């Protein structure tokens, strides 16, 4: 038995990129920044890590509608490493395939009281080997 679970809270670094695979499956990718204020880089600034997030199917609709650069996001997902070739050299990329997400900070509710985000979403395809990037 093994566990492959990632939980992150951070800020979106760029607007989502939406793609459709030949099979018709949709996916969205975004970068997420997490900052550790207790750890400093060489210049004395808080250390920031960048994570590549991949969303599938129903979650793509939510990402497309609500996720924009700067928004704070809570995600749970699974690490996936894939390989590809560039000019004959093998490269590797580690991504987080998101299973659950929640927008933080919210938006005004329709009744005028407080803030809320969309319902948490969960969707993950059985076959993600046909990712074209």
Image (spheres, rainbow, N blue to C red):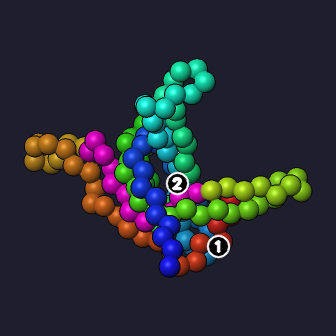
Of 16 and 6, which appears nearest the observer?
6
Residue furthest to the right in view is: 88
Task: List x then y, in percent, for residue 99.
Answer: 43, 65
**Main SS of residues in magenta:** strand
Q: Residue 61 carries which label?
A: none
Question: Which residue position holds label 2?
Answer: 53
Q: How many residues crowd around disc 1 within 10 Å: few (fewer than 14), some, or many (20 or more)?
A: few
Task: List x then y, in percent, for residue 107.
Answer: 25, 43
Q: Residue at (42%, 43%) from the top-left corner?
A: 10
Is 118 colored magenta in this rendering? no
Q: Residue at (86%, 55%) from the top-left corner?
A: 89
Question: Which residue position holds label 1?
Answer: 129
Q: What stretch is highlighted in magenta?
A: 95-106
Would residue 22 be visible to someone looking at this image? Answer: no
Q: Residue at (51%, 23%) from the top-left corner?
A: 45
Relative to 20, say whether 8 is above or below. Answer: above
């Amino acid at each position: 038995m093994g566990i492959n679970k990632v939980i992150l809270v951070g800020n979106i670094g760029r607007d989502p990129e939406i793609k459709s695979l030949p099979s018709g499956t949709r996916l969205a990718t975004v970068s997420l920044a997490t900052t550790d204020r207790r750890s400093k880089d060489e210049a004395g600034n808080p250390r920031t890590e960048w994570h590549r997030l991949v969303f599938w199917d129903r979650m793509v609709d939510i990402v497309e509608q609500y996720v924009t650069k700067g928004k704070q996001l809570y995600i749970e997902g699974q690490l996936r490493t894939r390989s590809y070739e560039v000019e004959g050299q093998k490269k590797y990329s580690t991504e987080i395939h998101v299973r659950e997400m929640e927008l933080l900070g919210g938006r005004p509710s329709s009744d005028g009281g407080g803030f809320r985000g969309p319902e948490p979403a969960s969707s993950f395809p059985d076959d993600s080997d046909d990712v074209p990037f």
